[in-house]
Amino acid sequence: MFDSLQERLSGILDTLTRRGALTEADVSAALREVRRALLEADVALDVVRDFVETVRERAVGANVVKSVTPGQMVVKIVHDTLVETLGSDARPIDLNAAPPVAIMMVGLQGSGKTTTTAKIAKRLTERGRSKVLMASLDTRRPAAQEQLKILGEQVSVDTLPIVAGQSPVQIAQRAMQAARLGGYDVVLLDTAGRQFVDEALMAEMVEIEKATDPHEVLLVADALTGQDAVNLARAFDERLSLTGIVLTRLDGDGRGGAALSMRAVTGKPIKLAGVGEKLDELEEFHPERIANRILGMGDIVSLVEKA
Amino acid sequence: ARSSSALGQNLTALIRKRRLDDETLQDLEDILVQADLGVETAVRITERLARDRYDKEIDDAELREVLASEITGVLEPVARPLEIDGARRPHVVLVVGVNGSGKTTTIGKLAAKFRADGKSVVLGAGDTFRAAAIEQLKIWGERTGSTVVARPQGSDASGLAFDALKLAREQNADLLMLDTAGRLQNKANLMAELEKIVRVLRKQDETAPHTVLLVLDATTGQNAMNQVEIFTQVAGVTGLVMTKLDGTARGGILVAIAARHGLPVHAIGVGEGIDDLQPFEAKEFARAIVGETITEAGDDAA
Ligand SMILES: Nc1nc2c(ncn2[C@@H]2O[C@H](COP(=O)(O)OP(=O)(O)OP(=O)(O)O)[C@@H](O)[C@H]2O)c(=O)[nH]1
Ligand SMILES: Nc1nc2c(ncn2[C@@H]2O[C@H](COP(=O)(O)OP(=O)(O)OP(=O)(O)O)[C@@H](O)[C@H]2O)c(=O)[nH]1
Ligand SMILES: [Mg+2]
Ligand SMILES: [Mg+2]
C-alpha cells in the first residue's frame, strides 16, 4: 500500500556501485526521501527536521558493509535512530509511592482515556494484585461517569459512587479520601476530554493535579493523530507533570508518526499501547514495531544486521 | 529547531522576501504540510501557485490570498449542506466512523438543528457495543426532543437498525438518524457488520440509507484518507462531517480528500455543545489552513 522507504531509496542509491564510506551527496539525496516518508507517516514537521539532521550526522562517513547497498545502509541508520528516539527507556507504570497511588489520565476528547483507565485497572488488579479504585471526573460528556461504572463492572474493579452535582475537583478529593479509607493501593482518575486551547478546562485539570498529587500523569493520545500531535503533547506537558504517554488505536492501519512527534517534544516515555476496544487489548509499547510502521518496511533491518 | 508556532515567524520571513522563489515556495509547502494536507497535495497546490507567478514579486497580502483561493477552489465544490428529502418518510441517515471521532455528538447536534426546523426525528442507538453508548444517545434524545430506539447493550446492531426504521416508518417521522459503534476501517469483521446494517435497512426500504455520513476527527492525519476510501467501499458514504475544529488541528487532509473523492462536506463540529455545529464554508476553512497569522501580519504590513 505504501512505498516503503527502502523501495524509494533504491532508486536513488542502489545505482551506486561504489562501496566505502557514504558521502555527503549520497546522504543528502537519501534524506530528501526520508523526510518525505516521515511526513507521510504523520511525523510532525519540526520533529522531522531535527530527526533528519541527526541521521545526516550519523550517516555521512558511515562505512557501507559489503553485502548491503548504500540505500539499505541509510535505512538501517534511520531505523535505529527511530527506535532509539521512540523508546530506549521503556518503563512500565510506576506504583512506587505511598498508597493510595493516584494515576491521572488526560487528553483530547475521544482519545481513549476512559477505556484505557479500565484497561489499566484490569491489568493492575490481575497482574499486580493491587486493590484499585476508579473515579470518573468527567461531568461534561453525556453518560461519561456511567461509562466508567459499566467498565468497572466488566473488569470487576470498584468505581467511586456517582454523586450528582459535584465538580471534577470535588470528585477527585472524594476519590482520594475513599481510597484512603477503603485501603486501596491505586486510584485511577479518568478526566474529561479537553482541547488544550480551552483555558478554563486546562486550569481545571491543573487544579485536579494539585488536589490529588498523582504519581503518574498519563497523556492518552490517538495513534492516528496528525501534525497536531506536537502541539497537544507540548501543551499538556507544559501544564502538568506528565510522566508518560499512552498511545491508543494502534490496532488501526495508521503509520503512527504521532508517537515520534510526542516522544520527541516531551521526552516522556510511551508507556503503553492500546490495540483494541476490548479491555485486555493493552500492550507494552514496542518501539521496534512503530519504527517499522513509520518507515513502511519489513525485513531490511534484519538483513543489514545479519550482514 | 523551528517550533510549530514558528508559523508566524515563517510568515514574517515571507513578508520580507516577497519574491516567489524556491525558498518561499518551500515555506508555503511546509505551512500546508503542517495543516495535514499531506506532502503530495501540498506540493500540488504550491506548484499551481508557482505556475504563473514563479520568481515574480508578490506582496504578502496577495500571496496569502492566492494560496487561500487555490485551496478554496478545491473545497468550494464539496461545501454542501445536508439536505433532507421530504418525500422519504423517514429520510434515513446512517452515521459511521472510527472510534471516538464524534458520531454520537454530531447526531445530537444535527437532531437539534432539524428539530428546530420543525422536523420529527427518531434516533437509533446502533452502538450496542460501547459501554454507555446507548445512555449517551438517550441523553441527546432528551436534549433535542427526539425519539430514541434502543435495545440492551450487546444486542445485534442490525436488528436494532431494523427496529428503528420500523418505528420511524410507523410514526411517519421526517428523519431517522442511526448511530453506529466506532470501528477502525481495517477491521474486516466490524466493517462486515456495517454492510449488514445497510442490507437490513434495505429490507424495509430499498432506497435506504439515503445519507451515509462519515464523521472525521480533525486531529487525524493522513489516515483519514484511508477511512474515506474503505468506509465508502463498504457502506457507500455520501457525505462528510469534520469534528473538533475548535482546537488547533486544521483538518487539512480534507483538501486532499476533496481533490480525490469530491464527497460533500456537510458541516463541521466546533465544540461539544448542542450548537457547536457549523456549515462548512470553503473560504473560511481555506483561510484557517493558511493561518490567521498571515492575515494579521498582512494587515499590519498594509
Ligand atoms: N480500536 C480501538 N479503539 C479504542 C482504543 N481505545 C479506545 N478505543 C475506543 O475509542 C472510543 C473512545 O474511547 P473513550 O475511552 O470513550 O475515550 P475518552 O478519551 O474517554 O473520550 P472522552 O471522555 O469523550 O474524551 C471508544 O469507542 C473506545 O472503544 C484502542 O486502543 N483501539
Ligand atoms: N472539542 C470538540 N469535541 C467534540 C466535538 N465533537 C465531539 N466531541 C467530543 O469527542 C468525544 C467523542 O465524541 P462521541 O460523539 O462520543 O464520538 P463517537 O464517534 O460517537 O465515539 P464512539 O461511539 O466511542 O466511537 C466526546 O467527548 C465529545 O464531546 C467537537 O466538534 N469538538
Ligand atoms: Mg472519557
Ligand atoms: Mg458513539
Image (cartoon, coloured by chain):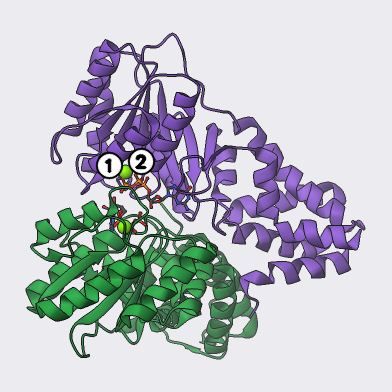
Chain colours: A green, B purple
Mark 1 and ligand 2: say if the CB distance to the nearest ligand atom is below 8 Å.
Answer: yes
Residue ranking furthest to the front = A165
Residue visible at 42% across and 33% down in the picture: B213
**Observer-nearest residue: A20 or A61?**
A61
Chain of the residue under the numbered disc 2 shown in the image: B
Q: Quadrant of the N terminus of chain B?
A: bottom right
**Left or right side of A283 for B291:** right
Q: Position of residue A294 (x, y in %)?
A: 42, 66
Picture coordinates of residue B141, whole percent (x, y): 33, 33
Looking at mark 2, is its residue's CB closer than 8 Å to ligand 4?
yes
Residue A52 can be seen, yes or no = yes
Of the numbered discs in the image, which one, if any, rests on residue B104? Answer: 2
Q: Could you tell me which secondary element the residue under label 2 belongs to?
A: helix
Closer to the camera in the image, B53 or A219: A219
**Rendered-image quadrant of the C terminus of chain B:** bottom right
Q: Mark 1 belongs to which amino acid?
A: Ala
Assess disc 1: are there few (<14), some (14-19) or many (≥20) residues with their C-alpha within 10 Å of its C-alpha.
many
Q: Earlier in the sequence, mark 2 or mark 1?
A: 2
Which x, y percent locates residue B110? 45, 32
